[in-house]
Amino acid sequence: MRRDFILAGVILGLALLIGWRAPVFLTLATLDDIATDTAILAMMALAQMLVILTRGIDLSVAAMLAFCGMAAALVGQALPELPVGLLLILGPAVGLGLGAINGAFVAWLNVPPIVVTLASMSLYRGATFLLSGGLWVSSHDMPAAFREFPTERLFGLTHLVWLALLAVLLAYGVLRYSRFGRSIYTYGGNPSAARYVGIASKRVLFSVYAISGAVAGLCGALWVGRYGIAFTDAAQGFELQIIAACVIGGVSIAGGIGTVLGCLLGVIFLGIIGNALPIMAISPFWQMLIFGAVILAAVTINRQKGRAAKIILRPKTAEGG
Amino acid sequence: MTNFNLTPLPPYSFTWGLRLMRRWEVLLAVLLLLVMVGNSFLSPYFLDPYNLADATANFTEKAMIALPMALLIIVREIDISVASIMALASLLIGLAAEAGVGVPGLVAIGLLTGLAAGLLNGTLIAGLGLPSIVVTIGTLSLFRGITAVVLGDRAITAYPEAFTDLATMKVIPFVSLEFALFLALAAVFALVLHGTVIGRRLYAIGLNPTAARFSGLNVRRTKLVLFTLTGLLAGLAAVFLTARIGSTRPNIASGWELEIITMVILGGVSIAGGAGTIGGVVLAVFLLGMAGFGMGLVNVPGIVMSTLIGLLLLIAVAVPQLLARFRRGGEG
Amino acid sequence: MVLTVEGLKKSFGAISALSDGRLSLMPGRVTALIGENGAGKSTLVKILTGIYQPDAGSLRLDGVERVFAAPQVAQAAGISAVHQETVMFDDLSVAENICAGHWPCHTRGWRKGMIDWTALLAQAQAVLDRLGVSLPLQARCGDLSIAQKHLVEMARALCHESRVLIMDEPTAALSHREIADLYRLVRHLKTQGIAILFISHKFDEIFEIADDYVVMRDGAFVAEGQIADTTTDALVAMMVGRAMGAIFPKRSVPIGAPILEVRGLSHPTEFEDVSFTVHAGEILGFYGLVGAGRSEVMQALFGLTPVSGGEISLDGQTLRVNSPKDAIAAGIAYVPEDRQGQGAILPMSIRDNITLPLLERITGGWLLSPKNEGAIAETFARRLAVKAPDWHCRVDTLSGGNQQKVVIGKWLATTPRVIILDEPTKGIDVGSKAKVHDFMSDLVAEGLAVILVSSELPEVMGMADRIVVMQEGRPYGSFERADFATNPAQGAAMLARAATGG
């Protein structure tokens, strides 16, 4: 909790600093831009957090995003009359399938997550290439409604922002109020002991990867619509940003520790840096460098000194109580 | 109870290596043979010595890094930043070349940059006890970011001819300096891992780090040295890659970490630590290298190649699990 | 009869852990399950709770044949357990640890199916009230003391609507007062008609609380009956299968010059002001409850944990021990408590385990020398009578006792002056246990100094020349053999009191 406050303070300080250098940054329009720009990152980071909480990692999310985005775009191109809602459902449906493949390997074949998702990352990226024949689907090939949906507004906010807010609420609700959510923490905290309290570990593991796939799929459809282009290399390297957001937000790669609030703060932090650079006329090349430095700083600060340390000595005066 | 099993051998000794040869390494060798035969059907010139020499150039740099990466994975660590270390090393080599530094100086700068970058990884991971995945994702971003910031949109191409000649230099006919160096390194790594005290300790650390520490092994220092070594060899690979392509761009060697890790895992090194042989890694290196070269001969795009690598990797990790399950099911 | 099992069998690879598990539990009665470590009790418990599936045998609940395919099934059938292993989620709160796995949910309204945190807190509080203890419900479990964690585990077992409660060595880490509380609780549960299976090594406990007993030895059922009809001696005889006097081969050895002297050794959180001296030919016992800080002191001596103060000297020379390597070089060897986690590298061969700490010494450089290694391994494997086809055998194919012999062999091969044995006979079979004890006598006869850390009172009393008792990280007192060996019953009571502060 305390580190969330510190991170929030850092974010606020950073925003004020940037606003002081470039006042345009602190306008509602800019904040709206940042929110819209980081909505996809937010959804992906929350799904990634579920995976990391179970001591796993999903490196294939960006590739799944590209594949599902491409699938939605191609279907949209072939059947322009299809309602946009169906295209938006197609994304997560396909993503669920891809994520389930990851989940099956991790849960039932006991293959380490990093190996599974490293492999499926190239597999899904290549599948995107095969699916599209290496061609691009550009904005004029897509149905207008599909292109416009992500940035259309409802009560002043874009659909993307609404979806991200929904994802935050859903993630909070699931992690706090569902048996599944608590099982994730329980399993991540102590996988071998989770058996003793009757947690269906394999189902939990499978589910988090399937969810990660489904969210990546939804984000794929939104991504393609928002940027008006689907191509094989879409969102390349995005997985690193997503994991970075989690790490900065205090999600422990060792599992069992992490909150929706922290993760969200990590996303906002990256979103601010990503959007501030162009406003402050700093070359976008700096972004990667800064992200790297921030990840290293965050993981160093989060270092848990002697998590397993026990305290045997108790003050002498407290004895016999 | 039947007792037809031979005395089980430890999974890391030389003799076990030989036994494994009968399974995993043999499978890799057979696949390699098939690829070679297939390639010679695809192109009548494939087996031409010039052509083969050319083929090795495409994977030798990755192969050099695969060797220390295998040791890292054996001790349960991983380094995802290797390709970024190469980019950083290539950048500094390029800047030095622009400043007019001579060939020995350029090589030294490449090696030192790699060494320093590896030392940074090692210090954060072994010194502070941070998880290697997160740290090396961070340094991946950091090193590549530095390269991008310094280079911006430009590329460094002003390399002296004496430097670019490093890539084409032959020690004996048809064997490039680079390839010979890789073979020598592979031999040294194999000897160290399978025949020395150091190798035994690496397996011990990978199989049970706690018991290894309780037995007086310095687990942290070992890991620090391995990360530094990995950085050093990434620096060496950067020297040859820069010399070979004669230019440094921000996206140099981009995505190589994936291929290198795939080589190691396909070579039979267990991500859970404590198992694997250099022989297997070398075979996997050749298998992937030759398969890639063959596909290049028939103009298969690189991305299809990496798709197949991904698929191969999934199959490689799933098959042993499925077999074990099948065997258990058969007994019970 | 609530629960009856017969002919349960379970093996792991070539090792048979349970060959004939037999048991019947009755409502409102406490059945003590008695047997030495390695007798198969924990395996039986894990089968009853659905964690292991038996290879053969039958399990009947209320006369109906059942199969517990998973822990959830056993829980749903009303069987719950406090396991020997810590089942603890350090980053979750006390309340959630108690209710882990069966979180109460809203049953109506829009929140139907969602976790009811108010009910969860109430339920956890109710269970703690039943136990008669108070713990901060919102505290992180990782911050609790060992005894408090134990209470959380007890509470978790009671959180179910259980009809059968299994307690696997529930008193190992508790103080006298806490044990008394536990008895009160067990009696209370009896009146509610719960059938209780109580596993313990301590006979005073068994006679205090149990109604019936079942004795197991070497993975098989030996006898059953009512506690009222038996005596400690009879139980021990059934348990070990031989007379009591033969267990401890204590030989009298002349005690020589002091070898290791420790003065005021302290650690910021784990122990404070520990001083003792071990002489050549002496076995120094360290007794205390689990978690009293004994292992921590030994690990500091061995250079595994840095200390905040104090002095260690060997043969009168001040010693700086910053790493296990220093300790090994100085002639200190440490056989750790957790044999499989810290002692042996299970997937490695006997030879490679034995030679690991001294590879440099025996290879004369960097290249491995299979011949030298084989010779050393063979010498020590033979000396400890390790039962294995040859030294190529992987250690995980050996029985627990033989694994322990390999670990001890590994440390003897370093030619130590002082050897620290931390719970050396925990979880090993009777034969190996006797071998280890016998071997300790050999070692001191050769002039080594031995430190024996043990939680088994008979063991320390049987083997030690002097006993240091530790309590909550501090040495509580030191007792000479004459103080406790002349009248074992009085000695035992004295030591137990010192250890628990009761």
Image (tube, coloured by chain):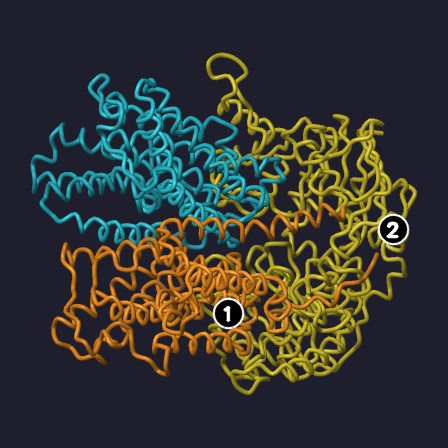
Chain colours: A cyan, B orange, C yellow
Q: Which residue is mark 2?
A: C235
Q: Which quadrant, please, contains the N terminus of chain B?
A: bottom right
In the rendered structure, the residue with mark 1 lies on which chain?
B
Tag shown at residue B278: 1
- Which residue is the extreme one toward the right? C229
Q: Secondary structure at mark 2?
A: helix
Of the pair A134 and A303, the residue shown nearer to us: A134
* Number of other residues with Cα within 10 Å of mark 2, as a class: few under 14, some 14 to 19, many 20 or more: many
Q: Chain of mark 2?
A: C
Instruction: Tell me: A186 left or right of B121.
Output: right
Badge 1 marks a residue whose secondary structure is helix
Q: Residue at x 66, y 61 (%)?
A: C287
Q: Residue A144: x, y in percent?
A: 23, 22
Q: Count the numbered circles shown.
A: 2
Task: Give the foreground label among 2 and 1.
Answer: 1
* Label 1 crowd bin: few (<14), some (14–19), many (20+), radius 10 Å: many
Left-right relation of C324 to C228: left
Q: Is residue A296 visible?
A: yes
Dividing the picture into quadrants, the one containing residue C466 is: bottom right
Across and down, in percent, residue A94 comes to 43, 31
Amino acid beneath label 2: Leu
Label placed on residue C78: none
Instruction: Using the image as rendered, state which of residue C263 and residue C81 is in the foreground.
Output: C81
Q: Residue at x 72, y 30 (%)?
A: C188
The image shows residue A19 at horizontal and vertical percentages of 10, 38
Spot the residue most to the front: B44
Res. C213 image quadrant: top right
Q: Is residue A287 above or below residue C393?
A: above
User: Residues under labels 2 and 1: Cα distance?
Assistant: 57 Å
B203 left or right of C422?
left
C288 relative to C369, above or below: above
Front one among C314 and B195: B195
